[in-house]
């Protein structure tokens, strides 16, 4: 540390512990000039303080706007979950529940590429475009073992074999995928959501909403 730096630190410590210094030396305060933050001119200390306060206020307002945006987004998600839940409650049979799940994913949640994989005996659930029914020992489930073991939704890129199994001819178009295990360690199966947008389902996103979605589907299938 140079002598000049040491002297600056000494002055800074003194002013920090003697905040009334400029009250006792007001003529000095009036003569102080500071570089303008956005130009080469100089301004008074008071003008600089006003400028700092304005910048602080702008930062606070920006943060508040971000909070409002997040709150509105959360409200929208809550409303969609409410619609989804009501549709499932109206379903009286498993087939009806599956129909409501598919329709709500597509209409309420804008999940046009979705697949419901159910682990069930042959003939227990009618297979259709949205549903794949597999026995527990089906080799296709092997690639999802880590997902089932973890028991939590996973977002990001899926392996080629997984995408091809889930989305068939649309596999190449899927830029990102969300995989949601259903039941304890995937005992019921899984829900897969695909998007052409690589950033829609990314590894850093919160999976709380997806986990609740999986819980609702699991309970609806068990009840129907």
Image (cartoon, helix red, strand yellow):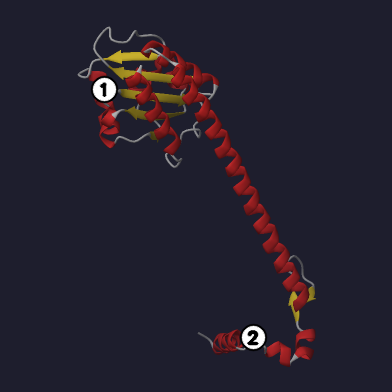
- The extreme bottom residue here reads 24
As displayed, is residue 37 above or below residue 197? below
Looking at the image, residue 72 lies above or below residue 162: below
Give the residue displayed 34% in from the left and 20% down from the top.
223
Q: In this view of the protein, can residue 160 be seen by the observer?
A: no
Picture quarter with the C terminus? top left
- Which mark lies nearer to you, 1 or 2? 2
Per the model, the C-alpha gap separating discs 1 and 2 is 69 Å
Density class for disc 1 (Cα within 10 Å; few <14, some 14-19, many ≥20) is some
Badge 2 element: loop
Q: In the rendering, at what x and y percent does residue 201 appear?
A: 46, 33
Of helix, strand and loop, which one carries label 1? helix
Relative horizontal placement of residue 212, taking residue 139 as reference (left or right): right
Asked which quadrant contains residue 76, the reply is top right
Residue 217 visible within the image: yes
Is 64 positioned to the left or the right of 43 in the image? Answer: left
Above or below, 1 relative to 24: above
Image quadrant in which you'd find residue 59: bottom right
Residue 54 rendering spot, x and y as whole percentages: 73, 64
Residue that sits furthest to the left in the current view:
137
Which numbered disc covers residue 19? 2
Task: Say few, some or many: other residues with alpha carbon within 10 Å of mark 2 (under 14 / 14 to 19 / 20 or more).
Answer: few
Q: Residue at x 54, y 88 (%)?
A: 6
- The reply to whether dot 1 and dot 2 touch (C-beta < 8 Å) is no
Instruction: Identify the residue under disc 1.
Output: 141
Residue occupying the point 26% across, 25% down: 187
Asked if 128 appears above or below 2 in the picture, the reply is above
Q: Position of residue 66 (x, y in %)?
A: 61, 48
């Amino acid at each position: 540390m140079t002598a000049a730096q040491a002297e600056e630190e000494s002055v800074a410590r003194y002013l920090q512990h003697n905040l009334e210094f400029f009250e006792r030396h007001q003529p000095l305060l009036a003569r102080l000039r500071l570089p303008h933050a956005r130009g080469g001119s100089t301004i008074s200390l008071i003008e600089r303080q006003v400028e700092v306060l304005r910048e602080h206020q702008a930062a606070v307002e920006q943060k508040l706007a971000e909070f409002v945006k997040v709150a509105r987004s959360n409200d929208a998600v809550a409303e969609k979950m409410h619609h989804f839940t009501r549709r499932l409650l109206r379903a009286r049979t498993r087939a009806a529940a599956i129909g409501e799940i598919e329709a709500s994913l597509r209409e309420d949640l804008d999940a046009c590429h979705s697949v419901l994989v159910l682990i069930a005996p042959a003939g227990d659930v009618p297979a259709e475009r949205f549903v794949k029914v597999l026995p527990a020992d089906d080799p296709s489930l092997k690639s999802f073992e880590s997902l089932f073991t973890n028991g939590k939704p996973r977002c990001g890129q899926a392996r080629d074999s997984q995408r091809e199994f889930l989305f068939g001819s649309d596999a190449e178009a899927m830029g990102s995928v969300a995989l949601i295990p259903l039941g304890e360690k995937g005992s019921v199966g899984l829900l897969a959501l695909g998007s052409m947008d690589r950033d829609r389902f990314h590894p850093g996103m919160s999976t709380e909403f997806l986990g609740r979605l999986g819980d609702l589907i699991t309970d609806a299938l068990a009840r129907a």
